[in-house]
Image (cartoon, helix red, strand yellow):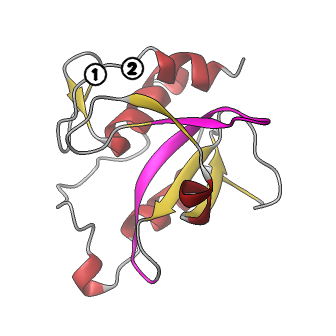
Amino acid sequence: MSRAVEIARGWIGTPYVHQASALSHGCDCLGLVRGVWRTLYGKEPEIVPRYSSDWAEPQGDEQLLQAAARHLIPVDHVSIAAGQVLLFRMRDGAMAKHLGIVAQVGECPTFIHAYSGHAVTESPLSAPWQRRIAARFAFNKG
């Protein structure tokens, strides 16, 4: 099993709290990825500025995609592997603003994520979720 998946599964059940990143106390999707990063590498690579739930959508700014590209390794859209970080667009033409970590691949793939109204959970990486993937990344000590 991927070390990132093992760490992310330890966050399952952590309540959703916007902008938070505290195991068992609260996190959002970015906070989950930040928490996995800290366990893998220690200090986070940059200070995360305050952000709203719209992720700069009105300005058309791909802030989350740009940040992921600065600190993670881009992965092609052909291969999917446990431990990859997925970046999602929730609607066609929208900014990418949701993150998850691939937990299981194969016939029934899953991913771990946090979203409003739910604790961190492992969900099926169903066809509707797969269609929303904007980019894939691998963790890398930056």
> Does residue 68 show up magenta in the picture?
no
Residue holding disc 2? 11
> Given the image, on which type of amino acid does mark 2 rest?
Trp
Please determine whether, in this image, residue 92 is positioned above or below residue 35.
Answer: below
The residue closer to the viewer here, 63 or 126, is: 126
**Residue 138 location, x and y as percent?**
67, 44
Residue visible at 22% across and 55% down? Answer: 49
Q: Is residue 42 left or right of residue 108?
A: left
Q: Position of residue 110 (x, y in %)?
A: 60, 35
Asked if marks 2 and 1 touch (Cβ < 8 Å), the reply is yes
Q: Quadrant of residue 127?
A: bottom right
| Count of marks placed on residues | 2
What are the residue bounds of the magenta stretch?
A: 93-112
Neighbor class of circle 1 (other Cα within 10 Å; few <14, some 14-19, many 20+) is many
**Is 51 left, or right, of 2 in this rendering?**
left
Quarter holding the N terminus is top right
The quarter holding residue 142 reads top right
Q: Is residue 13 left or right of residue 131?
A: left
Is residue 106 on the magenta stretch? yes
Disc 1 secondary structure class? loop
User: Which is nearer the eye, 53 or 66?
Assistant: 53
The residue shown at (68%, 37%) is: 109
Which secondary structure type mostly characterizes the magenta part of the structure? strand
Identity of the residue drawn at 29% across and 47% down: 47
Neighbour tally class for label 2: few under 14, some 14-19, many 20 plus, Cα within 10 Å: many
Residue 57, compared with residue 36, is above or below; it is below
Q: Secondary structure at mark 2?
A: loop
The dot on residue 14 is 1
Type of the residue with mark 1: Thr
Q: Nearer the viewer, residue 13 or 50?
A: 13
